Every structure is written in C-alpha cells, then in structure tokens.
Amino acid sequence: MIKIAKEAARAAGEILRRHYGQLEPGAVRQKAVNDFISYVDEQSEAEIISHIKKTYPDHSFLAEESGMQRQNSKYQWIIDPLDGTTNYIHQIPVFAVSIALKYGDDLILGVIYNPLSDELFWAEKGQGAFLNEQPIRVTDKGDLAQSLIATGFPFKAKHLLPQYLEAFAAIFKDCRGMRRLGAAAIDLAYVAAGRFDGFWEIGLSPWDVAAGAVIVREAGGRVSDFWNQSYFLHNNYIVASNGKIHKDLLKRVQRPFPFFIDVHEKDES
C-alpha cells in the first residue's frame, strides 16, 4: 500500500510540476472566501484516485475536490491533491501532494510529496518515518525558547481571529521564531524531519493533516487537538510537536480556546 501511495504521489506531483507557472487565464476558480481551485487540483486528484483504484478498487476515498466515495471497506484513502493552492497560483514553491490511508479509525500510512524539491516524506504505522529513503526524526529540544514553531492563519475561520491572535502572541513571545508557509502538509513534514519543532493551526480539514499526522508520529513526535485529545481530524484544531514541547504549546493555545468553538460558524465580518 505504501508503494502504491508513493507512486500516486509522484504521478500527481508530475502534473503539478508540469503546469507550475503555466496556469491559463480563467483557470482558477473560487470555492469560498480565500479558498481556490484550479484544473490542476482536479487533474492531480483524478490521477491519484485512478492510480490507487487500479490496485484497490473496493477502497473508499475522501478527497478535497471530489468529496466522499464510499465503499464497503474499512480502508479509506484521504487525499489532498494540492495542499498550498494559493502558493501554487502565485508561484511560491511551497506546496505538496498529501495522501493518507485509514483502516477503521486508525491512520496507518502517510505520504507527502513536494514535486519541486523532489522531497517525498512517508511513513507506515510502526515502521518509522522517512524522507526519500533516509530515516527522519523530530528534534529533541525541550525548551520552547529554543524552538522554531510553524502556524497557519485561520483564513476559513476569521471569526476566531481574536482568539488565534491571543494564542499566537503567547507562543511568539516565548519561542525562538514563528513561520507561516501556507501549506499544512509541508509544516507537518518539516516537524517530522526536525526542521520545525512544533506546529499549530485551526480550521484545517482531514486531508490537510492526515498524512502529516502519521509521519510526525512515526518520526517520534506527538499530534493532538488543542485539548490533548486525538480528534484533530474532525474538530479542525491541531498541535504537532517533537513531544517535548507539546505541553507548553497546549498550555498557550488553551488559554484563548478553553473549549471547542465551531470553526465553521458563519463569518459575519
């Protein structure tokens, strides 16, 4: 299964690479506020699903653009064909293909591929995490003051901006630095590879984080929602870290978010 996932990611990545900087006028459509799609997203997703179905025609799929395809199977592939679409549109070279596989409620593999850097991050449950064919590991920093943290702005949940900024300020003043790349899959892959020490965001969908969660965990890190539970695929709140600074990150995000707030509440601004 990991072989098929890696093949599908590379095939989709070739589509992204071929069209990068070549989008035709009118190729980009707006799905929602600050949320865009192009024919490249659709072609990439179709390639991934087609490739997987050749071997696993009875599996289910949850994909960003085509939604849910249910089958009578415990296996579900969770797919983001182009994480970082806005970056891609603006020719910012930070985007990725993200593919995960879930068996029942258990995430069992993840693949994240940046086609421009040719970096393929991947992991199987219980088998460790890898960048291309080299093992990767999270950092061992235990001091938030020495840690580089990634985040993403809540562009789909602007009604939560005051709480987000409070959490941002609490972390920013106590860490070495904060980065915002614009592609959550890349953020998570970088935590797994030890480039970031932690990551947090609100408003993400399952396809944004499923693959990265597997890779971070297999690299020795921790992934949870803001309340240290495992519901991040469903409640849209995620914290990932090397494990040693996880408690410090949770403490700071829980102050403005002591309990769950629906990120899908209509933005009246």
Image (cartoon, rainbow, N blue to C red):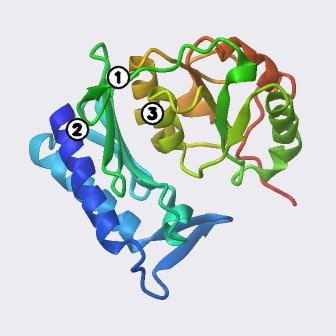
Viewer-nearest residue: 42 or 183: 183
Q: Residue at x 74, y 49 (%)?
A: 157
List the residue tagged with mark 1: 104
Residue 94, above or below 103: below
Observer-nearest of 64 and 164: 164
Point out which mark residue 130 bears.
none
Displayed quadrant of residue 22: bottom left
Cβ–Cβ below 8 Å for labels 1 and 3? no
> Sequence order check: which comes first, mark 1 or mark 3?
1
Q: Nearer the viewer, mark 3 or mark 2?
A: 3
Residue 172 percent coordinates (x, y): 80, 33
Q: Amino acid at mark 1?
A: Gly
Residue underneath mark 3:
212
Indicate the position of residue 261 as horizontal and vertical percent values. 78, 34
- Residue identified by numbered label 2: 59
- 131, 60: nearer the viewer: 131
In the shown orientation, is residue 45 left or right of residue 53?
Answer: right
Q: Is residue 67 left or right of residue 200?
A: left
Which amino acid type is shown beneath numbered disc 3? Answer: Gly
* Residue 161: percent from left, percent from top: 83, 46
Taking the image as drawn, is residue 231 in sight? yes
The answer for how far apart the CA atoms under marks 1 and 2 are is 12 Å
> What residue lies at 39% left-to-right and 73% top-to-bottom?
39
Q: State the residue at coordinates (65%, 31%).
A: 148
